[in-house]
Amino acid sequence: MNLMDTSKFYKDCTLCPRNCHADRKVGGTGFCGMSAHLMVAKAYKHMWEEPCITGPSGSGTVFFSGCNLGCLFCQNHEISHEHKGLEITASVLSESFLKLQSENASNINLVTGVCHIPLIVNALIMARDNGLTIPVVYNSSGYESVESLKLLEGLVDIYMPDFKYMSSELSLEYSKASDYPDIAKKTLSEMYSQTGPAVISEEGLMKKGVLVRHLVLPGGVSDSKKVLRYLHETYGNNILISIMNQYTPMPSVACHKLLSRKVTPEEYARVIEFADKIGIEKGFVQEGEAVSESFIPSWDLEGI
C-alpha cells in the first residue's frame, strides 16, 4: 500500500462534518484547532479500557491533540481544547506503534484522531511495512466524515466510536453539533460496513468489529434509552455496547444545572435495566461510582 499525498486534505480541510475549509497547510486552523502537523499528547499502554480491548498487558493507546466536537464536559480538555501535545511526523508515529507492539500491547488504540487521519494512514502503512501485526483500534467521538473513514479501510480492525446523544437539543448544547445524531448514525454504518460483526478470540480479545460506547449523563436517562434502542434495533448483537458510568464533573461545568453533578446510582441502574429489557446481550457495564479527576491521564508526552 502506497503512502498518500496528504497536502490536498489540509489545503481545504473537510476531514470532519464541520467542513471548515481551513487552509491548514499555511497554519490556519479550523474548529479542531489543529494545523497540518500531527500533534500527540501521549502514547502508552492503557489498562482501563474494556477488557476485550485492554487484554492482559494493556492497550497501546495514542492520544491525539485537537477535537472536532468540543464537548462542555470533556475530561481531556487539556489536549482537546487547549491543544497540549507535541508535533511529530508520521514516521515517528509509526515508530511509536512498533514500540508499543514490542512492549506486548494488545493493540494500537488511536484516540480522537479525526483531525489527523491522512497522516495516521501514512503512519499505519509505514508501521505495517515494518512489521506491525497487532489489531488497530480507531477510538472516536462518533462525529466523523464517511469520506475520511473510507481512507482507513483495510488499516483499522476495530472501530470504537461513542454514540453520545439521540437528542439534537442536547447535541447542540453540550457539543455545539445539532447534527450529531444523524452524523453518528452514518459514522456507525460505515464503520460496521468495513468490519462486519464483532469477532472475539478464545482469549477474550477483540480482533475485529465495532464496540460502541455510550456515556450516561446526569439527567440523561431518557436519551440514553433512545440511543440503546437505536443501536440494538439496528445492529442487534453484532456489535458490542459499553454503557459507561464514568462521567466526571469538570470545573468548566461547575455551574451547570445538570453537568455539575455525577450520575446517580439510580439513573445508571435504570439504563442498565432498560438494556437488559430490550435484549442487549453483548457488551459491558461499569460498577461503582463515577471516576474522579485523579483517574484522568497526565498529559506528560509519555512515549512520544
Image (cartoon, helix red, strand yellow):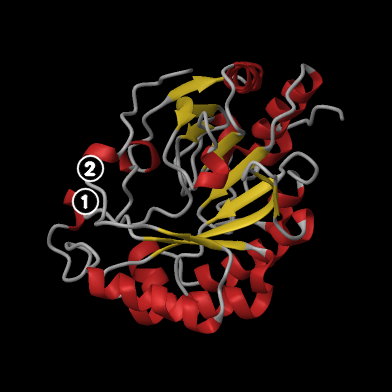
Residue corresponding to mark 1: 250
- Which of the numbered marks, if any, corresponds to residue 155? none
Q: Is residue 215 above or below residue 7?
A: below
Give the residue at x 50% y 75%: 227
Q: Residue furthest left?
A: 255
Image quarter of the N terminus: top right
Inter-mark Cα distance, 2 to 1: 8 Å
Q: Position of residue 201 (x, y in %)?
A: 70, 45
Q: In this image, 102 relative to 248: left or right?
A: right
Q: Is residue 241 above or below residue 32?
A: below
Give the residue at x 56% y 30%: 26
Q: Is residue 167 visible?
A: no
Residue corresponding to mark 2: 293
Mark 2 against mark 1, which lies toward the viewer? Answer: 2
Q: Quadrant of residue 92?
A: top right
Give the residue at x 39% y 42%: 80
Q: In this image, 194 relative to 80: left or right?
A: right
Q: Is residue 255 above or below residue 48?
A: below
Q: Quadrant of residue 103?
A: top right
Element under label 1?
Answer: loop
Q: Is residue 88 above or below residue 181?
A: above
Q: Position of residue 219 (x, y in %)?
A: 26, 75
> Of callouts 2 and 1, which one flags the residue occurring earlier in the amino acid sequence?
1
Q: The disc labelled 2 sits on which kind of residue?
A: Glu
- Crowding at mark 2 (Cα within 10 Å: few <14, some 14-19, many 20+): few
Q: Position of residue 105 (x, y in %)?
A: 57, 27
Give the residue at x 78% y 46%: 153
- Label 1 near label 2: C-beta < 8 Å? yes
Q: Is residue 119 visible?
A: yes
- Crowding at mark 1 (Cα within 10 Å: few <14, some 14-19, many 20+): some
